[in-house]
Image (tube, rainbow, N blue to C red):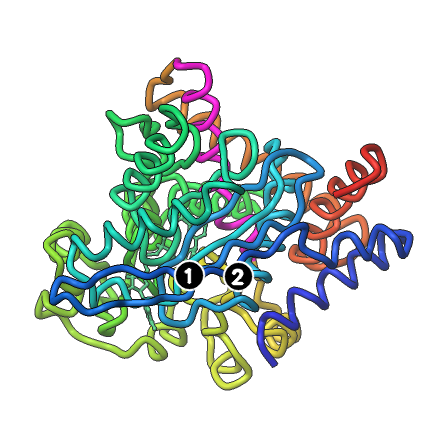
Amino acid sequence: MTSITSVRRSVDDAAELLQLPDEIRAVLEISKREMTVQVPIPRDDGSLLVASGYRVQHNRARGPFKGGVRFHPDVDIDETRELARLMTWKTALVDVPFGGAKGGIQIDPGQLSRGELERLTRRFTEMLSPVIGVFDDIPAPDIGTDPQVMTWMMDEYSNLDRYSPAVVTGKPEGLGGAAGRDSATGRGGVDVLEAHLAAEYRTIDGLRIAVQGFGNVGSWLAVEAQRRGAVVVAVSDIEGGVHDPTGLELDSLVRAVAAGGSVVDTGLERLTNNELLTIDCDVVVPAALGDVLSASNAPDVKASIVVEAANSPTTEDADRIFAERGITVIPDILANAGGVTGSYFEWTQNIQQFTWPRDRFDKELEVRLGSAYEATRTLAVEKAIDLRLAAYCIGIGRVAAAIQLRGHG
Ligand code: NAD
């Protein structure tokens, strides 16, 4: 059973609990628009590359569509559709004025030259240009895309329309990127974890954390958690992981990855990605791909808290096992909502042509995520449900209310 079923199940359970009418459930079920394109580009050797690209716009009852763009070989319409739905509930949960969307290209960006990647990104943007826009749909980075890819998207769109920095978020600072957006998803994960610990009269000090995925989200999360007093005992990337029970020195790992290498290039004690998830620690953070916590490894997880920094990392079976074992799961739509919250700050700054200092960005992020955690926990306690269902109820309830007021999604 995949986490796609798990997302559906959570939506059904939330709709049931909220007693939503059938017509509202039907609107929540269907995407507003789904686009599949073939993106052709000339390769450096003169041959033709044709890749499949997608943009799914799920719901815009609460504001323009918003969601990342993923470049990965596993991207397809089903995954994109489910991730777009997650975005709808996530934007509503943190109460930013957006709907939900997702996009991507089925490609391994590591196999492309820089020129090929730029041509692919620009062609894809041109194909999406009729449906994206500052007040229509605002893409952002996700797996395999970064501030450079966002810059090409912004530039291509601006060439077709007019200078439009607010058409994408996650841009570099100095070109409309907001100070703080690069670290916002990882930092937000730590903000939510600290809010959870505080509610349980605990602190992050000395907490042993293992992080799977050392890209944008995982690396910032690890660095920020360590800065606040946690001990990061293991991290990994696609090549595998490294481990030190006394705490890793993260600077050299960040440098290795920034230089285009892997965390395993650092000569530290190694472990596999699956071993990382079941290592002796207090908090495990999946921050890479979906479905990594399943029935096969959930019984062996030793952490007492799972922070879902990745989208959909826990299958429905694993979720049930964690509930039986008393392991708390901080769900993706809350744990990684720092990304879209930071994107909202970037978008507003672009529209106003007014930049915030970094400390304002970080503070507002903490306040918004703290409120979202508080609301989620309060509902979970009141209804005796888990944090995931509580988060879905809040998100879906707000979207349903907007649909009822506007008469459409
Ligand atoms: P990224 O491309 O920057 O990093 C991905 C990391 O995962 C890399 O370290 C990569 O080596 C590793 N990885 C890839 N395949 C792996 C595998 N099979 N096993 C183990 N590790 C693997 O991506 P990111 O932006 O950090 O996104 C990570 C997750 O966070 C995704 O699920 C994404 O949807 C989610 N997310 C990202 C953002 C954001 O702002 N970037 C916001 C919300 C959620």
Mark 1 or mark 2, which is nearer to you? 2
Which secondary structure is most common in the magenta stretch? Answer: helix
Kind of residue sitting beneath label 1: Val
Quarter of the rendering occupied by the C terminus: top right
Question: Which residue is at the front of the view, 96 or 409?
Answer: 409
Q: Residue furthest bottom?
A: 296
Residue at screen point 48% across, 43% down: 194
Task: Categorize mark 1 by other alpha carbons within 10 Å: few (<14), some (14-19), many (20+).
Answer: many
Please tell me in which quadrant of the rendered image residue 256 appears: bottom left
Residue ID for mark 1: 285
Placement of 276 over or under 391, stated as above or below: below
Instruction: Write the start and end of the magenta stretch as one range.
Output: 330-353
Q: Is residue 34 left or right of residue 142?
A: right
Specify the quadrant of the image occupied by residue 48: bottom left
User: Which three-letter amino acid code belongs to the residue tagged 2?
Assistant: Thr
**For numbered disc 1, what is the local secondary structure?**
strand
> How many numbered marks does the figure carry?
2
User: In x, y percent, where is residue 163?
Assistant: 36, 24
Q: Residue 297 location in percent, x, y? A: 47, 82
Q: Position of residue 234 (x, y in %)?
A: 28, 65
At 43% across and 28% down in the image, what residue appears? 166
Magenta-span inclusion, residue 316: no
Label 1, label 2: how far apart the Cα atoms are: 22 Å
Asked whether the viewer can see residue 283, the reply is: no
Q: Quadrant of the N terminus?
A: bottom right
